């Protein structure tokens, strides 16, 4: 395979692959289908949870949850149901989630392997091009 | 000079690809091992009934990290995988991971299952509200219906206790993002049908 045809293949692959990959790099937000209904459900869940705990029952008067619910805002995590998790509900940004606590972040499912695969493939292709391009013309003839 | 640079790039690229491929291959091997262990555990009915009895009588024993704990099937995206206990790198490399401390699928409470977006949950974005998920855990088969789907920042609180049975699936977002993804895709499901544990 000549250098010219290799370049043509690379350009064609770039035209096909780059638009889809590039568009995925921009983060997007999917709005909930029915945000108001979801927030009401969440508020009801919060109420049920609070009612099940006599200690936190007094906090049912906290109107913030209800105001947030009416405004379509997800209620703040309720930690009163479990006294042990009071301090753990607000985890530091550096700590990864390894056990379930009320109000915890989603586990760190981010993977660097796709990035490594891209870097490795890029380095291999670039190296191949440099090696082939570096061959003297008389050798290629 | 150009030739040396090309050679260096080829070697380093090959090493990076080998390491990456090796990591994927090891994950596939671990997933295969987990499926074998799961099949064996399901084949032993005595063990299953003992676990069910333990489930009905008292608090559950904590599974060790990496132990197969459930079977998850998502027909829409063709996923059929064994869920391992734990969400560390090793578990998530081999399969979807169950967040320790969260409920077991089908039991009252929020059961949280997470997986990498470049492996088992690589088509999770194709799921929509109304799609079904099937889990099998402790001889209890539960069919779930997805009722909510949201994308949040990776540092935002995402997982909450629920009084009723809930299944939460999480992965990184955007799905095709290179590097550490800045957001999380959260799918919430509620049970449609539950079979009773075998006694």
Image (cartoon, rainbow, N blue to C red):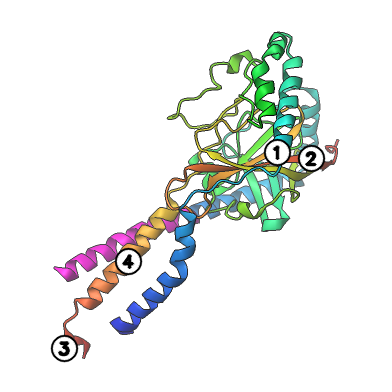
- Sort mark 2 into few (<14), some (14-19) or many (20+) by Cα contacts within 10 Å: many
What is the CA distance from the residue labelled 4 to the residue labelled 2? 48 Å
Residue A70 picture location, percent across and down: 70, 27
Q: Is residue B99 left or right of residue B27?
A: right
* Marks 3 and 2 in Cβ contact (< 8 Å): no
Q: Quadrant of residue A2?
A: bottom left
Q: Is residue B61 visible?
A: no
Which numbered mark, 4 or 2, is in the foreground of this view? Answer: 2
Is B164 situated above or below A114? above
Chain bearing tag 4 is: A
Residue B35 in view, yes or no:
yes
What percent of the width, then of the height, locates residue B194? 83, 40
Q: How many marks?
A: 4
Circle 2 SS class: strand
Write down the chain letter for disc 3: A
What is the distance, in whole Å, between disc 3 and disc 4 at their CAs?
A: 25 Å
**SS for callout 1:** strand
Label pair 1/4, CB-CB below 8 angstroms: no
Kindly identify which residue carries mark 3.
Answer: A138
Q: Which residues are magenta?
A: B1-25
């Amino acid at each position: 395979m000549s250098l010219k045809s290799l370049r043509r293949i690379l350009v064609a692959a770039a035209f096909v692959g780059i638009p889809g990959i590039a568009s995925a790099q921009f983060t997007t937000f999917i709005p909930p289908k029915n945000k108001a209904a979801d927030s009401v459900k969440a508020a009801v869940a919060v109420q049920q949870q609070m009612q099940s705990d006599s200690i936190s029952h007094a906090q049912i008067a906290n109107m913030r949850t209800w105001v947030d619910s009416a405004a379509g805002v997800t209620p703040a995590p309720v930690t009163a149901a479990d006294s042990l998790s009071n301090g753990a509900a607000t985890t530091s940004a550096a700590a990864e989630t390894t056990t379930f606590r009320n109000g915890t972040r989603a586990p760190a499912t981010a993977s660097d392997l796709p990035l490594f695969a891209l870097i490795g493939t890029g380095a291999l292709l670039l190296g191949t091009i440099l090696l082939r391009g570096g061959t003297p013309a008389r050798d290629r003839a | 000079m150009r030739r040396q640079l090309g050679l260096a790039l080829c070697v380093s690229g090959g090493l990076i690809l080998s390491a990456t491929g090796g990591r994927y291959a090891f994950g596939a091997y671990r997933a295969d091992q987990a499926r074998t262990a799961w099949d064996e555990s399901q084949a032993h009915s005595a063990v299953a009934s003992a676990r069910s009895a333990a489930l009905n009588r008292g608090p559950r024993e904590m599974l060790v990290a990496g132990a197969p704990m459930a079977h998850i099937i998502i027909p829409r995206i063709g996923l059929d995988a064994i869920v391992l206990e734990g969400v560390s790198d090793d578990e998530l490399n081999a399969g979807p991971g169950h967040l320790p401390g969260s409920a077991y699928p089908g039991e009252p409470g929020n059961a949280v299952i997470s997986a990498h977006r470049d492996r088992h949950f690589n088509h999770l974005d194709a799921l929509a509200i109304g799609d079904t998920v099937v889990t099998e855990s402790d001889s209890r088969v539960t069919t779930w219906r997805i009722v909510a789907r949201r994308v949040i920042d990776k540092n935002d609180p995402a997982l909450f206790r629920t009084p009723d049975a809930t299944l939460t699936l999480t992965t990184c977002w955007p799905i095709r993002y290179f590097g550490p993804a800045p957001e999380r895709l959260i799918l919430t499901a509620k049970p449609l049908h539950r079979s009773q544990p075998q006694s």
